[in-house]
Every structure is written in C-alpha cells, then in structure tokens.
Amino acid sequence: MRIDKSVFVVTGASSGIGLATAKALAARGGKVALVARSGDVLDRLAAELPDSVAIVADMTDFGSVRAAVARTLDHYGRIDGLVNNAGRSYAAAVADIEPEAFEEIFRLNVLGPIVAMQAVIPAMRAQGGGAIVNVNSGTAFMTIPGYSVYSASKRALLGFSLTARMELEKDGIVVGEVYPFVTATNFGRNRMGKPGAGPTGNYAEGDTPEFVAGLIVQAIEEGAAQVFANDRIRALAGA
C-alpha cells in the first residue's frame, strides 16, 4: 500500500512507538489521526506534523474508540490505514493476578484493537481496501514468569489478527502484525502490577522506537502478515 496522501489512524500516538510511527508516516506524505489520552501532547504533535489531527480517546472505552474513528472520517473523508499500537503490560505471578487488572489489560490490548478494526472496516470496504497493522510483541511466543497476562493478551491478538487477515482478504483489506523486541520506551515504567514480579531488563538499551516504526511502515507498504524485529522472534514464531 502506498503511504503518500493516505489517511492513517495511529493509536498510542503520544509517545514511544506510536509517536515514532506517526512521524514516519507523515514524513512519507501520510495524513495521520493522532489518537491517545494525552490531549496536550497530541495538540503539540499535530502542530508539528502537516495534515494531522489530534483526537483524544481512551482505548479501553469502546464508545471513545468508535468516536475517534468517526471523527477521523469526518475530518478526512476516508481511512486508508489503522495502526493499533496502544497497549500496556502487567506483571504478576499467576497466584497473584488481580482479575480486575486482567480485565483492564485485555480490554486495552485485545478488545480495543478489535473495536478499532470493526470501526474502520466499513469505510475500508466502501473504498475498496485498506491496511491494518496490529503491534504485537515477541512475548506472544514466549513463556515468561510474571508476564502470563501480557503474553496471553498478545497471543489472543495474534489469533484475531491472523483470522481477520483471512476474513478481510476478499475486501482488499490487508491485516498484518509487527513483533517488536525490547524497545527503548516507557513500557517498562508504565506497566501495571508489582514492580518486582516480572523481568527487569534495561529498556533504554533496546531497539529504538524509530526502528519499530520502520517495521510498521514495512508492514503497510509490503502487506506482510508478520514482520519481526529480529531472527530470534522469527524462529520462536516458526516463521
């Protein structure tokens, strides 16, 4: 899919991978609806990126997700691409999992992207096609003590994404996934749960958000089903 002059919705656009992705798409001539909860940050970013619009939305609030897509359509008249990036981690041993936190993580990491997909599909069908990229995680293929909830949410997203790819192929809508490895973002600091419950890697030494944004751009342009940050994740996926 060609990025130039195409309209994209990017969730979690206020920082990290989402921010880098919004900038990468705009640099290639894309028009970007910047979706996140941080209105002030989005307003500053919209002032920086040409032909972009700031839309405040909470991905755990499904009405808010649908409204963000509707506003994008009102503003641009079309939606060519969706990048489901917003997400959060949760660290807890299985014996200590809080059901309410489990529900929140699945609402954000799985149901939010599904609702966003459902919201853009009618417009993409009417246009004759589009591209959807869901940002997954290498942990979808791993068993990591303390990270069962997060890994399970990403495995669920994997299943829905691959199924949607098959279901929407006839409509010209290409669904793909990107699998980052450890990335230098606020992901580790923002995770829910007990501080010492999960692995404690140095995220500052991970891949840059710009590197992952490049993978997302690749998934959009090539229409790939899965794009991996490195060969280790590819091998774990059996790809």
Image: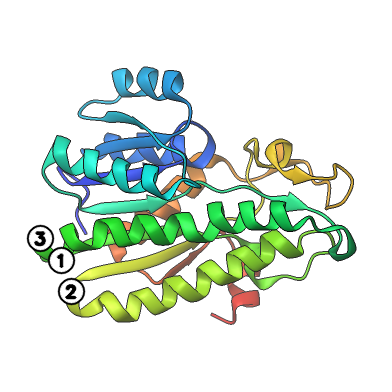
Q: Identity of the amino acid at label 1?
A: Arg
Q: Nearer the viewer, residue 10 or 22?
A: 10
Going from N to C along the chain, the mark reached first, 1 or 2, is: 1
- Residue 19's place in the image compared with 145, above or below, is above
Q: Using a 10 Å C-alpha cutoff, classify the residue at mark 2 as few (fewer than 14 neighbours), some (14 to 19) or many (20 or more).
A: some
Q: What numbered label is drawn on residue 125?
A: 1
Q: Position of residue 205 (x, y in %)?
A: 71, 40
Residue drawn 83% across and 52% down? 199
Residue drawn 35% across and 35% down? 34
Tell me whether the residue at label 1 lies in contact with that at label 2, contact meaning CB atoms closer than 8 angstroms: yes
Q: Identity of the amino acid at label 2?
A: Asp
Q: Mark 2 points at which residue?
A: 171
Q: Using a 10 Å C-alpha cutoff, classify the residue at mark 3 as few (fewer than 14 neighbours), some (14 to 19) or many (20 or more).
A: some
Tell me where residue 165 sits by quadrant.
bottom left
Q: What numbered label is drawn on residue 127?
A: 3
Left or right, 17 with respect to 27, comes to right
